[in-house]
Image (tube, grey):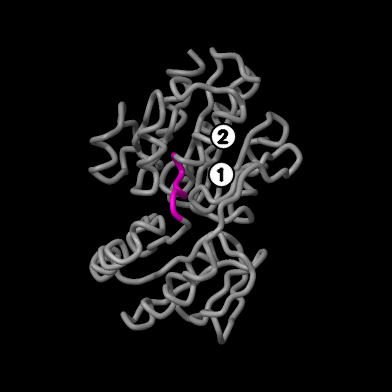
Amino acid sequence: MIETTHKLLAIDLDGTLLNSQKEITPRTEAALIEAQKRGHRIVLATGRPIVGARPYARQLRLDVYHGFLLCFNGATILQCEDDKLLYENYLPAQFIPKLYTKSKENGFAIMSYEGDFILTESVEDKYIQHAARINRMQILKTRDFANIKTPVPKCIITGKTDRLILFEKQLRAEFGDELSIIRSESFFLEVMNRGVEKGTSLAQLLQMIHVNPENLISFGDSYNDESMLRLAGWSVAMGNARTEIQELADEVTASNDENGVSQVVERRVLF
């Protein structure tokens, strides 16, 4: 059990903790490790798969300081010290052929995950290649995406921003009562099971480790961070965050290229 004076820091990865080179800067690394030494704990809350988030968890020594990975936008929560899966909420299989058909009809690529691989029919799609590159994953080509048999945490539909915004509205109109539909990047439209989002899963974690939301500090920059920012006792938007995210946060810090996370940690946690 965490003492009530200790904080849980929920930190998004891309655009928040990581700079433009997808790195944690030495200043930010030092601040977060010091915070953990003082009894605070960290959950890296990301849309990335576990394999794509794990190197950053190791860099911050979350396995030593009892931290967590919240991945796939909240579909899974992993306890880093022993790789124990604390929570999972996967996409019901009956929706995969529907999402596949809708995506193909509208000219979009679609991907998901199988183990440590990205699974797709569209191996040449530049956005899927981007996902593979940043997560250091290989792409596994399938000729029958609609009939995936293994459970998957989410599907990602990729495409140009303006068209994807319109498609998001279409999907919400048809599946909004049954699925969670969120844009994590301008070119990524993520589809999970109903109720899966960072804030909902974080609320589950807070109950498990006996932390009140008032002792949660959340950091984010994009639409998929909104729910965890609203949950937190103190919410922080990055200087590079989307306008809507900055407007709902308690504080706007410097950008991810200006050590925005460490500036807040140094002032509010390590004072």
* Amino acid of disc 2: Leu
Q: Which residue lies under the disc numbered 1?
A: 70
Q: Mark 1 or mark 2, which is nearer to you? A: 2
Q: What element carries label 2?
A: helix
Frontmost residue, 183 versus 191: 191
First in residue order: circle 1 vs circle 2: 1
Q: Which residue lies under the disc numbered 2?
A: 205
* Main SS category, magenta section: loop
Q: What element carries label 1?
A: strand
* Percent coordinates x, y for residue 16 in the rendering: 43, 42
Label 1: few (<14), some or many (≥20) within 10 Å? Answer: many
In-image side of 270 versus 2 (left or right): left
Which residues, given as a range, are shown in magenta?
194-199
Q: Are marks 1 and 2 in contact (CB under 8 Å)?
A: yes
Residue at mark 1 to residue at mark 2: CA–CA distance: 9 Å
Point out the image quarter for the N terminus: top right
